[in-house]
Image (cartoon, rainbow, N blue to C red):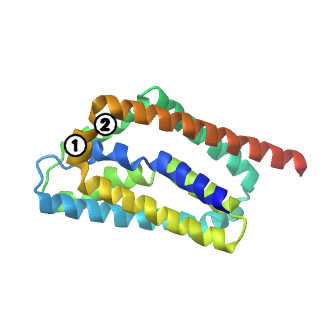
Amino acid sequence: MLDYFINAFAMLFVTVDPVGLAPMFLAVTAGMSAANRRRVAVRAIVTAAGILLIFYAFGQAVLNVLGISVSAFRVAGGILLFLIALEMVFGKRQERKTETAEKAAQADTSHGSIHELAVFPLAIPLISGPAAISAIILLSGQAPDTLSYAGLGIVIAIILLSCLGAFLLADKIERLLGDTAQLVITRLLGVLLAALSVQFVADGILAFIDR
């Protein structure tokens, strides 16, 4: 059970990347007051939590309705996570996130825009993107028992709170890490995610063979 929680936390932390989202949050909320930044941060986390919890609770049911086996989703999800890992290792993912943030930063920072920025691009796709959704469905399908499944919900909450903390401390985190440290951390996390994704693909293939 402990191994499951460690793997779940590692995969979701690497996939969502709360620390890496800090500079994205700064770019999106450039020019906003501290109070508006806090409102954007809280609204983004609440929106992302709703999305992720829907797939946490009903992800398996969606697969059943579509006639997709857990093994097939493990392979597909593992491949998707591996592609994300490649982007992280070679620095492409940060470039893509920066581009998304810069486009959103061009928007008006009015009251209405605060709600829009919280939903896009912060909640979707930076926090609750396809990779995070895939990881949650995969992990919920792997839960060995009810207690582990409930624990996954706690892990998701911890990751979301980490994102909130990163948003509220974004300016300090960016100054503390610097560009070089962020590049090193992103690449190390990418290698870890690549290894985890390969394990998912291997488990899915083995499950197909055993059927």
Residue 154 is situated, as x and y percent measured from the top left of the image, at: 51, 68
Q: Amino acid at mark 1?
A: Ala
Q: Residue at the spot x=29%, y=31% of the render?
A: 179
| Left or right placement of residue 177 versus residue 200 in this view | left
Q: Is residue 207 above or below residue 179?
A: below
Dot label at residue 95:
none
Q: Quadrant of residue 95?
A: top left
Asked whether the viewer can see residue 56, the reply is yes
Q: Quadrant of residue 111?
A: bottom left
Q: Is residue 77 above or below residue 50?
A: above
Asked whether the viewer can see residue 117, the reply is no
Does the residue at mark 2 contact the one at mark 1 (Cβ under 8 Å)? yes
Q: Residue at the spot x=63%, y=46% of the render?
A: 77
| Figure label count | 2
> Is label 1 in a helix, a strand or a loop?
helix
Residue 176 is situated, as x and y percent measured from the top left of the image, at: 25, 40
**Disc 2: which residue:** 98
CA neighbours of label 1 inside 10 A, class few (<14), some (14 to 19), many (20+)? some
> CA separation, marks 2 and 1?
8 Å
Q: Residue at the spot x=56%, y=40% of the render?
A: 193
| Left or right placement of residue 98 versus residue 113 in this view | right
Residue 61 is situated, as x and y percent measured from the top left of the image, at: 66, 67
> Is label 2 in a helix, a strand or a loop?
helix
**Disc 1: which residue:** 27
| The N terminus, quarter of image | bottom right
Residue 52 is situated, as x and y percent measured from the top left of the image, at: 49, 62
Q: Amino acid at mark 2?
A: Thr
CA neighbours of label 2 inside 10 A, class few (<14), some (14 to 19), many (20+)? some
Chain-order first, disc 2 or disc 1: 1
**Along the viewing direction, whichever of 145 and 32 lies nearer the viewer:** 145
